[in-house]
Image (cartoon, rainbow, N blue to C red):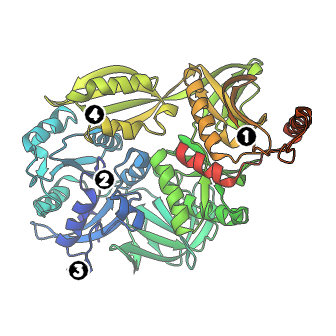
Amino acid sequence: MSEPLIRNFCIIAHVDHGKTTLSDRLLEHTKTIEMRQMKDQHLDAMDLEREKGITIKCHPVTMAYTAADGKTYQLNLIDTPGHVDFSYEVSRSLAACEGAVLLIDASQGVEAQTVANATLAQQQNLEIVPVINKVDLPSARVEESRRQVEDVLAIPADDAVLASGKAGIGIGDILEAVIRRVPPPRWSDYPQARALIFDSVFDSYKGVITYVRVFSGTFKAGQSIQLLANGVRTVIKEVGRFSPKMVPAGELGPGSVGYIVTNIRDVHDVKIGDTLTFSEAPAKEPVPGFKEVVPMVFSGIYPLDTADYEKLKVSLAKLAMNDAALTYTAESSVALGFGFRCGFLGLLHMEIVQERLRREYDLDIISTYPSVVYKVHTADGQLHIVDNPVLMPDPSSISHIEEPTILARIHIPGTSIGDMLALVQEKRGTCDRTATIDDQRVVLVCTLPLNEILVDFNDRLKSITRGYGSLDYEMGPYVQSDLVKMDILVNQDPVDAFSSIVHQSKAEGRGRQLCEKLKDLLPRQLFKVAIQAAIGSKVIARETIGSVGKDVTAKCYGGDITRKRKLLEKQKEGKKRMKQVGKVSIPQEAFIKILKNEG
């Protein structure tokens, strides 16, 4: 198809504003899928996406639509995730498009992730088509949403299209607005062939399949191509489009979105965001607008059965190719054996990766407490990057520690502002400023330590605001903080799996909590076992597991009391000696229970 008749666009929105439902209606309206094959959340391929009702991966599809001007257009749509943890997927999709449909829930209005995604689209110079969705709901506040589009996003309110994905209202208007306002494919006049890899999957029969947006040149089967980042050369075995399943095609020309099957078998060779070009006349520069991803949260992932280590290694390699935001390096733990230190974009991303490993690769795994990357300055002037508490330098040599912060935009109802400020304060954060969206909603702009929002911040935000609050954040600077490494000692031996880096003010409470949990979970020994939380050599919390009693005086049924005392003294000496040489082996179940509760 000629370039003036091609439109590339994606749907972006806050989580749960109806992106996937709207994509379903677009597929029906353009007759891309027959009604008998149609199902809800059609583009969500994973069971996990359907169960949780969220989009995790971006999903491309090519549609043909005859517009009001009588011409038939090729529309390439990419459905994107809405959660802040998957904003990396959104940025990749935006790099492959010329326009974006920005969806706003009429009953919720403009939320945190709406603003963040609109800003991402504007940075890529995309044409934004605002759509106010769910206008058929009784709670819809259409005029208020229009006003927010203008006031918060600085987009003319008259441009907004009114629609309902559920009821199928305004679907034709959205398609017409896309054709009228989204420009034809850009950068198609570049002298060499270039295609952006915005996703890839591994097929055990075909090898690596790359999802591409072609900017210039025409790609066909049999051509010799190369990857610009690492110079790897290969031959195209097949090209095709998504409708929405993979359908082979003769060629992919400028402006097209589709897939390219290569004979690359090593998943490490293909990098998301790389540029494909012809090996005979390679492009001088890659497609712009793509940025490397930096993991925010780190956690150790270990197989429950040590024999599954190799299987976990292969599974992580395949998963990392499909999810470029995931990083991993091998590590070992005295308590848990061999495993991997994995980097994630956030806690939801971590949960999804672990769930995919369990389901798609049939692995039983355990993960350690999540931590972030700290900058540790030692007295000799050296800087240590620490993502694992075990790697922390000796406390006596540390000059100071810096921790990462985030700049958070928290959208909440005005009635929850007091409780929300108390939560921010509890998490060692500061509120920089507040702004009013309308008579019901406010925005808090806060600076918070990344470590503090890892576990329960989002849950507590939702409960304080009764589900109406939303959070979006971006990375802030590193700041100096009073942080310490807390060890858990069982019978004087440190257990590395329970080590963590905490703020001095919270160390005692957290240490006591962990000691109490371990006291309940560890089996009793023949001697008393001390469970201690310590910072360096200073013990800050302690619990004691009582010894298993044995009645050594049972055989003394009479006679002098000194006989009983003698036996009791002998037992006491034996327990004392046993405590010095005895080892406490912590059962795997105790690790699993503690780490699951912590995560």
Q: Secondary structure at mark 4?
A: strand
Q: Secondary structure at mark 2?
A: loop
Please tell me the numbered disc located at residue 391. none
The residue identified by callout 4 is 411
Residue at image point 70% right, 30% down:
384
In this view, the residue in front, 245 or 363, is 363
Q: 444 above or below 58?
A: above
Q: Give yes or no for contact between labels 2 and 1 (Cβ–Cβ under 8 Å).
A: no
Q: In the picture, residue 147 is in which quadrant?
A: top left
Question: Mark 3 or mark 2, which is nearer to you?
Answer: 3
Q: Secondary structure at mark 3?
A: loop
For label 1, the crowd category at 10 Å Cα-Cα, with few meaning under 14, some 14 to 19 and many 20 or more, is some
Alpha carbon separation for disc pair 1 and 3: 58 Å
Please state the horizontal and vertical placement of residue 386, each as a whole percent of the image.
66, 34
Question: Mark 4 or mark 2, which is nearer to you?
Answer: 4
Alpha carbon separation for disc pair 2 and 1: 53 Å
Residue at image point 52% right, 56% down:
353
Question: Mark 4 or mark 1, which is nearer to you?
Answer: 1
> Horizontally, is 166 left or right of 282 in the view?
left
The residue identified by callout 2 is 98
In this view, the residue in front, 260 or 557, is 557
Amino acid identity at mark 2: Glu
> Horizontally, is 89 left or right of 509 in the view?
left
Question: Mark 1 or mark 3, which is nearer to you?
Answer: 1
Please state the horizontal and vertical placement of residue 359, each as a whole percent of the image.
51, 67
Please state the horizontal and vertical placement of residue 199, each as a whole percent of the image.
47, 61
The residue identified by callout 3 is 34
